[in-house]
Image: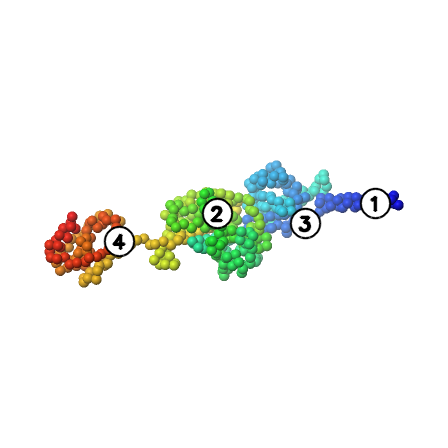
Amino acid sequence: MGQIRFGILLRAILLQCFVTRNVFSIQKREWIDAPTTTLTEGDVSCFSDYMEMWIHSVRIEGLGIWLSGALRIHVNLTSLDHLNLQLSACGFSLHRDPDKNFIFRVSYTGCFVQQEQGYHVLTLNLVKRISRFGGRPHSVMMKCPVVSVLPSREQIQCDPEYIQVTRKVPHGNWDNELHWSLSLSDHLIVALEDASLIQMSIDMSGPDITVQGRRRDVLSPVKVMENEGEFLALKLVSGQYAYSMEATCPKVTVSTAEETVLHIFKRHMGLTKRGSSDNEPLTVSNVSVNQTDNFTLRETSKFATLIIPTAQILQTKACADSKQLLQPFYRVDVVLTFKETNHKMHWTMENALPCTVRPAVTHFTSSPAPKTTALSTLNFGHENLTTEEPSLDRSTVLAFSDNLLLLKGLLVLPTAFFVSACMCVTLHNVREVPGWTGARAAAGQMKN
């Protein structure tokens, strides 16, 4: 009885090993000979500045062989960081997805990319493996439509309380309208109509989209080369697409410094891959500022920093809350060109500082005596001031605290008054000068 059971168990184990061997064999043949459904034109994703193709890990060897021959480089797929340094010279990059497969990205300005009948086209002559010892050539075409006009403009308005960002409403590469949501800091996603849930308001009444929020609710501190600012990490997202609404505001300060420092967030201005880290840095090849030619440009991997003399851009306007106050502000219009993209970045910053008291202006008004007029604003910038001495008449002479004389409606100020550092003068103790003697003495004081 025991031998029978042992025989049955042994036969079951052998049968299981046979089935398992066949399954592994079938899977191995599928990995080698499976049709290249992932390497077709339909699986190419098109974005504003680049296109991407998903490649299964078992197919990546063919791409490595093509890159090695086309670029004359040694391709080591185990060290993608080093490989991408080599690929970046041609506008290529290679990344792993969460499933350990690969994403091959090609810039429209990259090597071997041609424009054919309104499309960006790159043909990859890959090798399709048919056995462990060989393969046959297999051509794959990456193809995306040429988009002549991109929404490359961004207008940012900052004040002590709010930030507002305006951009063109984006469309897909096939000119299809996309249904957008808002993504704040890559983890809070709401529909446009629910923007208030992330403390934002939104307006899409025309061709532009404008978002606004309180600085303390939506901005995060950022430090760029020892300079502080506040960053809005906001994007529009739809399916696989993302569209940057990111912006930086200068830190709120009461006083103005001699130099104004502006941080411009470098990124692709059109449609990008949603969730992509965009590790490929952008390098500024040209920059112009509409308001001045006197500026300094510095770069980090994420920001282009402009340093501009404040006196060349600073203006003032009446404060909205009180016409008695002035509000300093400036506007800067910048055009940036990046080496890695086809399109320019048009960036405008309007920044308003806290309202301040208007510059002190002193007015003197005579007392309500007959035949008197108001004194015009004093100009304290003049060091030498001469006055014409009028003739004195006893009936028209008044003295003001022994320092001021009002003669027939004309206010005459002695020289000693201008030397005084006091900017405010109180007129008091008005009295009539008794006789010519007092008037003559007062006039003598003015001459001295």
| First in sequence: mark 1 vs mark 4 | 1
Pointer 1: what residue?
Answer: 9
Classify 10 Å Cα crowding around label 4: few (below 14), some (14-19), many (20 and above): few
**Residue beneath the point at 55% across and 49% down:** 49
Q: Secondary structure at mark 2?
A: strand
Where residue 435 sits in the image (x, y, percent)?
11, 57
Q: How has the structure been colored for display?
A: rainbow
Question: Amino acid under label 1?
Answer: Leu
| First in sequence: mark 1 vs mark 2 | 1
Q: Are marks 1 and 3 in contact (CB under 8 Å)?
A: no
Pointer 3: what residue?
Answer: 37
Find the distance from the CA under tag 2 to the CA under tag 3: 45 Å
Pointer 4: what residue?
Answer: 424
Where residue 269 sits in the image (x, y, percent)?
51, 50
Question: Amino acid under label 3?
Answer: Thr
Q: Is residue 72 left or right of residue 430?
A: right
